[in-house]
Amino acid sequence: MNVFSKATARLMGATALLALSSLSATAQTYPNKAITLVVPFAAGGPTDLVARLLGATMTRSLGQPVVVENRAGAGGTVATNYIAKAAPDGYTFLIHHNGMATAPSLYRKLPFNPLTDFEYVSQVIDVPMTLIGRKDLPPNDFKELVAYLRANGNKINLAHAGLGAVSHLCSVLFRQAIGVELTTIPFSGTGPAMNALLGGQVDLMCDQTTGTTPQIKAGNVKLYGVTTSARLKTMPEAPTLAEQGLTGFQMVVWHGVYAPKGTPKVALDRFGAALTAALKDPSVVTKLNELGSVIPPDDKLTPAGLQTWLQQETQRYAPVIKAAGQFAD
Ligand code: ASP
């Protein structure tokens, strides 16, 4: 062995040792730096709100900051693609909603496969949606709204968060159900879309109660109905869209937490345990319940609970989206 190969061998040995020690450090000391929780929409929207609430609670239990990073674009698929390709080191996670199940049907060329390219951590929260309008939109209830849209359809602007967002899906199903074409305006998230609605730049939006409840309660927007089969405890005066004649139009937004494929099990387990604990924290539960949402049962707060649900939802949405005829490359 010459000097060069001796040095190389020593270096390789040192590298192997280093790799070994960083592996065991993961097992013993994870997390030892900040963890990024990616939100696939702009700040200020419902997904962002849930991520920040959970992130703050998890920061306390994990002893390292859980930092929310907004990576908006293409209805959530930009962030999802980012996670599919991110280093599986246990320091990058994604929170996403039904969009994970609808994207394969909506996009002809999706650069990732939600069913195979991720690690599944847990379901998170189930949230109803509301159909809301700007405060001074003339119709005062759902019946008046439908008549108004039939008369003025192409002049009405409906805001959403891009193809793949639940606000978009809700608007597609709504337009299909009432048989009216509206002008749709994509935003990077329903946080910015809400600002446009409050500012009167757009007319209508369908969004999660986690985003809309405060504005509805403050009387800043008009509420035309909720998308659940039963009325909500948080706003019992609000009729469901179903009871106002829009049958077969029920939507609950579910959320899940994902990690890049190959993320060490120790990180998945520890992050998952902190997430479950945050979802049982009384102040978190109270806050989320006040915003109309519910924490799923324990069997859904598991990797298998999320993975099985995602598979079922992917299958369920495929024919619905095909019938709605909305696709993108
Ligand atoms: N509510 C959004 C959606 O329509 C996204 C967001 O949280 O901004 O999917």
Image: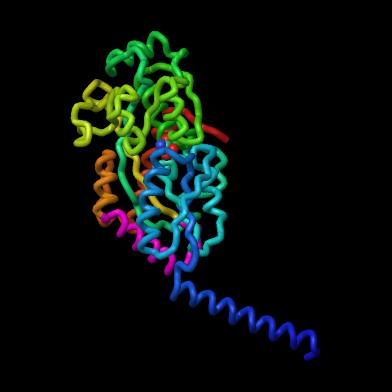
Name, please, the residue furthest toward the bottom: 1
Q: Decide if residue 307 is in sight here.
A: no
Residue under the point 32% across and 35% down: 209
Q: Can you tell which quarter of the image residue 9 is in? A: bottom right
Residue 92: % across, % down: 50, 57
> What colour-coding does the image apply?
rainbow
Q: Main secondary structure of the magenta part?
A: helix
231 or 62, nearer to the observer: 62
Q: Quadrant of the C terminus?
A: top right
Q: Which residues are magenta?
A: 259-281
Residue 303 in the image: above or below residue 191: below
Left or right, residue 290 beside residue 109: left
User: Residue 63 location, x and y as percent?
Assistant: 40, 65
Q: Nearer the viewer, residue 290 or 255?
A: 290
Q: Nearer the viewer, residue 91 or 168?
A: 91
Where residue 239 sits, quadrant-wise, is: top left
Q: Is residue 244 above or below residue 43?
A: above
Residue 22 higher or lower than 5, as above or below: above
Position of residue 215 in the picture relative to residue 181 (left or right): left
Determine the residue positioned at 52% across, 46% down: 79
Question: Which residue is found at the position 54% from the left and 33% from the top?
Answer: 328
Residue 52: in sight, yes or no?
yes
- Residue 51 covered by magenta stretch: no
* View quadrant of ligand 1: top left
Q: Going by the picture, which residue comes out furthest to the top?
A: 151
Which residue is at 30% across, 36% downward? Answer: 128
Residue 293 screen position, x and y as percent: 28, 42
Who is closer to the viewer here, 109 or 71? Answer: 71
Image coords of residue 111 (percent x, y): 57, 46
